Each structure stands twice: as C-alpha cells, then as structure tokens.
Image (tube, helix red, strand yellow):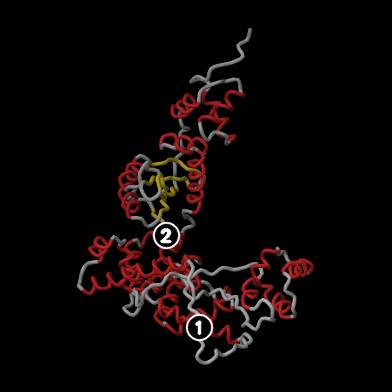
Amino acid sequence: MEERFVRLGKVGVKPFIDGVYKAGKLNLGEPGARLASHLAMPTSPDTLLRRIREAHLPVPMPVRVLGVDDWALRKGQRYGTILCDLERRRPVDLLPERSAEALKRWLRNHPEVQIISRDRGDDYIKGASEGAPYAVQVADRWHLLRNLQETLTRVVDRYQGKIREAARAVAGILNSQQPKAKTTAPVQGEQLEPTVLTKYQERQQQRRARRLARFEQVRELHRQNVSLQSIGRRLGLHRSTVRRFVRAEVFPERASRLTFRRTDPLIDYIRRRWDEGCRNAVQLTDELKAQGFQVSYHMVRRRVFDWRLADPAAPPEHAAETTSRIPARPSSKRVTWLLLKKVQELETDERIFVEEVGKQCPALQDAATLARAFMTMVQDRQPEAWQEWLKSARDPAAATEFGTFAKGLQADEQAVRAALTLEWSNGQVEGQINRLKTIKRQMYGRARFDLLRQRVLHAA
C-alpha cells in the first residue's frame, strides 16, 4: 500500500518552503505546520522553523548599485542594516547591526559595488568610504529634505513669541471680516462667577507649571555657564530639549490642537437656519442630506451644542465662527511646513499667517527663503545652484542653524552633488523596510534575526 503520509525531511523541505513563501502563508511555525498537514506532510512547528533556518539561500547576483539603510530590531535600542540591489529592486542581505565595521566587511566581500545610496549617518559614510573607496556615494534626497526640515524647525523654535503674535494677528484679521456679535455690558457692581476648571484643565495647568519650572531652571543654570550636557544630566532632560530651552526667546508653550469638522463648510447654512428658529438637530440633518451632503445627526448635534448652551431659548447673538487652520499656538513643525509650502498651495488664512510671520520676524522669513531655495535645488536637480546656496547659508547674516547644516553638507559634498545629478535614491529601500516590518510583525515573538533574515531573503 502506498504510504499516504510522508515525513518532512531535508530532501523535501526546499520545494515546500518555496511554495509556502510564494503563497505568503508562513508567518509562524504553526500556520506552516497546518498547511503541511493539509499537504499530507505532517510536521511540528519547531521542526519546520528549524528546516527553514537550515535551508540554503539562493546565490545573489553581483550588485552594481547598492542601497543602504537601517531598520529597527527593537526600536530605540537595537538596529540592523538592510542592503538592497537598486537595479533589480530586491534586498540582497541583512546585517544584524548598524555600524561602520559591519558595512565595511560586507563591501570588501563584494568589490563589484560601484554606486552606494545612503543617508547621512556617520556609520554608513565611514563604512562605505573604507569598504568601497572607489564607489560613488549618493546622499538620499529624502533624507536631505528631512534634515532641512529639522534645521528650519530649530530656527522656528527660537521665535515662538513672534509666531504667537502672528497667529493672534491672523485671528484678528479673520474676525474683522465676520459680523460683530451683539454683546450685553455687565451691570455695574455685578460679580462674575469664576471659571470652573475641569480635571483635564487642572492637569494641563499642573503640567505647564512643572515645565515652566524646568525652563526657568535651565535658563538659570545656563546663566551660570553650566554646559548643556551637564544641565541635561542634572535635570534629567535630553540635550536637545536643553538646547531648545536655552535658544528660545520666550517660554515654548505646548502647541494647541486644531480639529476640523466635516460640518465646517456648512457652517453658514446651519447658522442661518438656527437663527431662523430651527433648533432641531434631526431636522437640520435631514435638510443637509436632502441637499446631498454626507452628514450624520451626531455631527450636527455637536456643531449646535455650544449654541444651545449659550442661549437655549432665544436666537443666538454670537459672533460668527471662523474655520481658520491656524491655531492660537501653532507647533513648530506646523509652522515649518507652512513656510516650506509654495504660495499657490496655501489657503487664505495660511497665506495671511505666513505674511504676518514675515512682518513679525524678518530673520525667520530669511531662513524660510533659504530653506525653499534648497528644497527647489534638490527636487529639480539643480547642481549649478549648489555653490550659490552654500555661500548664502554660510553667510554670517544667515541663521546659525543653517550655517551648521551647510557645514555638514560641505563635509559630504561629493555625495550631495551626486544626489543632484544621479537618479538613484533610497526610495525603494524604504519600501523594502516596510515589507520587512510586515514580515517581522507577522512572526510575533519568533522573529529572531536568523529566522527573519531567511524569510526576507528567501521571499525576495
């Protein structure tokens, strides 16, 4: 009688593994074992994982254009390196560490590499220079723009006081364009009730008080000529936080959140119907739906909730709400993105805010102009503009942050120039890292490096 069940041995493991990998069903030993059971090859999950570790990887083709980037084995603690063939668009190897020595060893074993695309990390610069001294290094354009954004954000951090003044000016301009509210003057001698804070607001004020105390401690220690590193160790703060506190003109308030509602474009109609006496949220919702708007009863009820509390019986006589995209305390990152956007891409309130920032703080406007010039140079591949931009950034009148940024770029000038002339970048490497993360998360606690490397390279 023909034997129906065949044990999974070393001879039959490779065809089975190839089929499982191509089907994309092997994330843990248990699903693979279940699939093997259906294929009349019963085996245990541990045996299957052991066979995968013992399986031989296909011999890689020679790599001419190499992409290098890091990925997190354990975020914030341990990182590895992924190496991709940019011409064939596939990963060729994973390294268990992010170090110059590991990259140098790999490159010395692969002398055929001619072009290396990488970020501006010191480890990869050193490893590529020592491991493949004759290869052309290309600085990744996305990382260049990311470094630019971080540089401009540090400049914005220094002028938070002026930015808040600009935000208040924008609110005043927008409110002046709305009909004024009819207010009733308080009776002489009338005692106003104190505002009752919620528990969340009380916690907010307590956190702000603690942060303000740390800010004042940092400034006091800095006045005593204590180094930034020593201040950080003494107060338990990161050095970048200490540097931001020292450079700030005023206390950096937490950015206020700005939420948008899907009923914002319909605010004029809802208010007009509310002033006409329609106080039923269900009826307002039906009217909006009849006009083709995708709204729900809960959206409309949340919109009119404050109006109902203000005056539940009489028609409301409140000022028109503004749907400005500029909060009272915009975050540094949000201001940075607004400064980097093209004028034609800005909304009306955003354009007014950028203009007000330029009026309140000309130094920040100059830094934004310098940043936009660099972004245009990178996006449009303009190597002829490199020397002129470098001269402007190193000018004593420019922001010190841009001088430091330009100094770092000048030290890596050949790679930056290659980024402005060659087509290669780390874009597809980032895609391979996303794929690696997906595989790693599918494996739960079994994603040790050796098994993960087998899975990623075998499936590639």
Q: Quadrant of the N terminus?
A: top right
Residue topped by disc 1: 192
The percent coordinates of residue 170 (x first, y second) are 52, 82
Q: Nearer the viewer, residue 299 or 72?
A: 299
Q: Nearer the viewer, residue 22 or 57?
A: 22
Q: How many marks?
A: 2
Q: Disc 1 residue type? A: Leu
Point out which mark residue 418 bears.
2
**First of labels 2, 1 by sequence position:** 1
The percent coordinates of residue 342 (x first, y second) are 54, 73
Q: Nearer the viewer, residue 86 or 22?
A: 22
Point out which mark residue 386 bears.
none
Task: Please determine whether, in this image, residue 359 is positioned above or below residue 447.
Answer: below
- Residue at image x 41%, y 83%? 362
Q: Nearer the viewer, residue 311 or 45?
A: 311
Quote the CA–CA distance across marks 2 and 1.
68 Å
Q: Which image quadrant for residue 110? A: top left
- Residue at image x 23%, y 70%? 221
- Disc 1 crowd, CA 10 A, few/some/many (<14, 14-19, 20+): few
Going by the picture, which residue comes out furthest to the bottom?
A: 188
The percent coordinates of residue 434 (x first, y second) are 50, 48
Task: Please determine whether, in this image, residue 250 is positioned above or below residue 70.
Answer: below
The percent coordinates of residue 71 (x first, y second) are 42, 48
Q: Is residue 279 left or right of residue 27?
A: right
Q: Disc 2 residue type? A: Ala
- Residue at image x 69%, y 81%? 314
